[in-house]
Amino acid sequence: MRLSVIGCGYLGAVHAAAMASLGHEVIGIDVDPAKIAALADGHAPFFEPGLDELLRTQLDRGALRFSTKIADAVGATVHFVAVGTPQSADGHAADLKFVDAAIEALLPILAPGDLVVGKSTVPVGTAARLAARIDEHGSGASLAWNPEFLREGYAVQDTVAPDRFVYGVQRGDSGIEDGPVDLLDQVYATPLSTGTPRIVTDFATAELVKVAANAFLATKISFINAMAEIAETVGADVTELADAIGHDARIGRRFLNAGVGFGGGCLPKDIRAFAARAEELGRGDSVAFLRQVDEINLRRRQRVVDRALQAFDGSVVGRRITVLGVTFKPESDDVRDSPALDVAVQLKGLGAEVIATDPHGIEPARLRHPQLAYVASTTDALAGAELVVLVTEWREYRDLDPSAAAQLVASPSIIDGRNVLDPVAWRASGWRFWGMGRP
Ligand code: NAD
């Protein structure tokens, strides 16, 4: 099939390359010429494991092209919309200006039978509004909403072999529209053939599935972080608590790691946008807990900063602090709303001499926070540190040898903001060690 993908960021670039690998002919469109030039040259403009190889293979096969011109999407039957939906500048609601602009740009090139497929995360009600706009234009094209659940760091695998598909389609008096479902089934024929579950539903449910999933995950993380706060007060160990409750299959151990909290380009803005939309709908009470989920999450960043202050008896002024990690999670270079970067910036603001390091996030972090000092090698970053703060759990940091690291630093003190190090081994090597919600 001939497909277009409008918006080639973390979601769209992967989607375009992955769809080409499934046998389709794909054109990726983005308004950012630098991004398109890099993609057309076979280089992802961000770090995502496996993406560069996939891009080059599909470009070489001639199955994948990139362009800044929407006119190059003419001839595609299915047009995926994967543009950003950031938090608005003046509140918690999602800013839909990119989605609206993408739909307006597509309208003149749509042909009868074409399908526009929204993949961006949007407030419930958006798809119905956009479907009306497409109908009003009279091209004979239709709309489906097909939310994306990929995880950065595993995006390629998650796109070619997701754990489920959700199709939101127009529900009329005669039931669900068949045409969009048939087209999406053709697009995803390969993963569907392996038995991947597919839920066909209406627009509103599909939109809600995405934000409900993220709200649930965020709540699970903030739940264990709330337990960490209590554990800190009574001298209990939240990691042992998580292990113990995680054995209950109804609870499960995943997403129960206490630490510095969640961040990134999705969870924080998605729970805020969900709460804002619920307010607009007169249902603010139903998801009022999301405000607490957000607050608990943000308190964990503060907790790490407070611990650092405590390590120096109340002032970090002039202290050399090494921050391990700036991305919001490992295997990604994404620093959007990153707890790690936030901690580094706060410590710098309090007068510390902060040295930040990260395997892939230094350049994106430097663009946002040029005031921080960045060092590429972990060994160089550790040299002379009076305090080490681990805030992104890259494998390299998890595997640090406490004895070797102790030789590099000026003073062996560490805050494990992700609870990934063994306190016994680190203390045995002479380190002052603080975890999150651990004695
Ligand atoms: P992103 O900022 O990395 O990418 C968005 C891209 O859209 C940018 O490259 C931008 O230049 C482009 N763009 C903006 N307006 C455009 C237009 N009119 N025409 C063409 N291109 C345009 O964002 P992202 O992380 O890829 O997220 C995109 C959407 O997917 C968001 O709604 C997000 O919530 C959702 N999502 C993201 C992930 C993820 O892990 N990143 C996962 C699931 C869902």
Image (tube, helix red, strand yellow):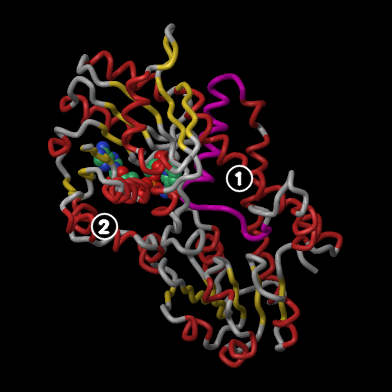
Q: Residue furthest top?
A: 173
Q: Does the segment drawn in magenta span residue 269?
A: yes
Q: Nearer the viewer, residue 297 or 248?
A: 248
Q: Position of residue 342 (x, y in %)?
A: 53, 60
Label of residue 217 in the image? 1
Q: Secondary structure at mark 1?
A: helix
Q: Secondary structure at mark 2?
A: helix
Residue drawn at (70%, 76%) of the image:
422
How crowded is the residue under tag 2: few (<14 C-alpha within 10 Å), some, or many (20+)? many
Label of residue 417 in the image? none
Q: Position of residue 81 (x, y in %)?
A: 31, 36
Does label 1 or label 2 sit earlier along the sequence?
A: 2
The answer to whether residue 435 is seen in the rendering is yes
Q: Amino acid at mark 2?
A: Leu
* Quadrant where the N terminus is found in the figure: top left
Which residue is the site of mark 2?
55
Q: Position of residue 250 (x, y in %)?
A: 74, 44
